[in-house]
Image (cartoon, rainbow, N blue to C red):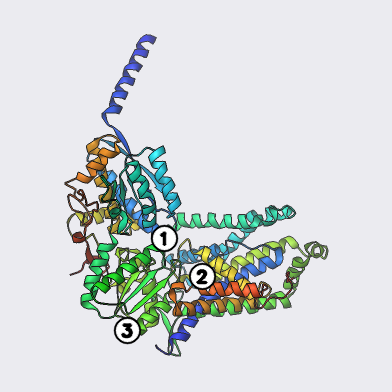
Amino acid sequence: MESTIVPQLMITGLALGAVYALVATGFYITHLTVDKVNFGQGDFVMVAAFLMLSTRSAAIPVMLAIPLVMAGMLLLGLILERVAIRPLDGRRSSNVGAFAWILTTAGVAFIVQNIVELVYGKSSQYSPPLFSSDRNALVHVFGMRLVVEELLVIATAMLVAALFYLFMFRSRWGKNIRAVAYNPDAAALLGIDTRMIKVAVFLVASLLAALAGVLIGPLVTVQPHMGLILTIKALVVAAVGGLSSPIGILAGGLLFGIAEAGSNYVDSTFGDLYPLVAAMLLVALKPSGLFGERAADVR
Amino acid sequence: MTTMNKVLASMALACVAATAGTAQAQVKVGVIQGLSGPPAIVDFGESYLQGIKLALHDYQAKGGKTKIELVVYDDEANPQRAVSLANRLIQSDKVPVVIGTVSSGNVLAMSPIFQKAGVPLMAGPAVVTQITAQFINESPSYIFRCSMVNQFEIGALIDWSAARYKKIGLIHSTTGAGIFAANEVQEGLKGKGMQLAVVEAAAPGVNDLSAQMSKMRDAGVELVLNFHESYELPFRALARLNYKPVIAGPWGLSSTKVPEIVGKDAVEGTVMGQALDVTAGRAREFDERMRKEYGSAYRWPVVASLGYDAAQIVFKAVDRVGKPDPAAIRDAIENVDGIEAMSATPAKPFAKGDHECVDKKDVFLGVWKGGVVTRLP
């Protein structure tokens, strides 16, 4: 066994873990503020990956393509909030209405998936590297052969977690969001535009999906059904890290990614099963996750 | 024209129309295919259906005397849905013959229904060996197949591999088809007195096989047999691992999607089971026509060619019978002759006791060479 293989596999695991963390951070911000998550967050990542594919096919430079993809995803986030979240606002008191967002966000995800299938077909697609025309563009780091996007997605997830932490706990905007999370009526009385905050958190979640989609495309084979597994794994990551802190979610994502890579190396037949079983045990023993608080409602 | 004359003229016209209607009998042919779900299923289903549609076009152009209408359903790679569609085609649509489907599990689930109902099923592009074998001793068997057969392509691969390589590894998916293929490979090599150096597996929806392929590399595996339905995944890990084994596997590796995703250079020299040689004769012409007809949506020549051949056999049998009589159509399929096949299907594909279009002698190995799959020398 080459001495570099273990760290190389760990970085591959970290990269996928970083993608899960980006998706799960989208869950964190909306769950914190409006008690809802987008069950199609993984499908939003898929849409962003396909949008990036389109911009690359149209020979649009990467630095222009990324903002274009983000703009597209902002629009999708806006539509999601308008059609799948806002209409349910007045129905929280009914038993059905309280959880209707699961159906509405999953419904939007199915619609989006079908539109992508109509536009791009149902097959798998190749998404080229961001900064090279060579399919196998690699960088050599301490003897390891790494894909640039692997390093980029890990760095991005770390940066996002740090920025989120500062934003949520050090900025006025973050305080406004937390105020809406604690008590929207009181926040409104204090002059905070609660409607705007509620829209903004879904836009932020869509931007995170855009980042994940741009970076994951060159690492995997892009296809219209790739979203569901991302959503499921991001939910697991959120449960492992705890839904109360972006740093906890990052740690949960990276741990889960490493566990996946490691278990696939040890026993590939059940490689995906062991991390999920470990996550279940962990949540059973510590329901608030590794970095969550003991209180049931972290707000 | 008086009112009475108008009425008489209308009645006369109606009689002429009715007579014309009986002159060309109409028969519905059912098609069940996997047209939605995972890309590996859809690529097979759409390609096979493309072949069926071209065959219908050609049948009509040649002036077939029986009007044939396709009734197409999508089983979504779901066995329950396949069973439900089989019942619907038999009871509601009253089709006398059915073609389908991708997933071997779905075919195994619905074939007893067709056998019991006495409605012929032309299975394809499912590959699992037992599909026709389990009914072949029935008198009569209503289950036929026009597709690759696992046993034949694995047999050809084993013969070739065992003669050339000492260290052979296997990667397979954890689906039923993947596990079944892995068992056949292991049994085949055992028969040659060989053992696999490494056996690795992966779930169908995984994104990365670096861990599995690194174990192949560390074990010094020269040939990797790839039976994971995301055919491109083993290739994607190779550059990172600085590893260049020969890769071989089932006919799925001949999908044009594989070089499209991993690059022509990466697949050069990759070997697979094959039943179509597009460099020669009718197959070449077929390949060109399909490219014109479907453009970039045409991505799997061998699957499309077997879909075409399955359909032309069924249409010829239906045309010979001329009415929706399942038993007569079954007999006509079994005795059909003079097929100008695009795939390696012989002119007389079936006989009593042989319900496979493609037999062991018809399966050969193909190899990616210069962006085209050619016959392995």
* Percent of width and height locating residue A63: 51, 73
Q: Amino acid at mark 1?
A: Pro
Residue closest to the eye, B356 or A63: B356
Mark 1 or mark 3, which is nearer the start of the sequence? 1
Q: Which residue is mark 1?
A: B39
Residue B205 placement, left or right of B346: right
Residue A39 placement, left or right of B1: right
* Percent of width and height locating residue A106: 58, 57
Q: Which residue is mark 2?
A: A214
Q: Amino acid at mark 2?
A: Val
- On screen, A132 above or below B127? below
Residue closest to the eye, A83 or B353: B353
Residue at point 68% right, 55% down? A86
Q: Amino acid at mark 3?
A: Gly
**Residue B267's quadrant in the figure?**
bottom left
Give the Cα separation between the discs numbered 2 and 3.
Answer: 36 Å
Q: Which mark is residue B220?
A: 3
Please tell me if label 2 and label 3 are on a single chain: no
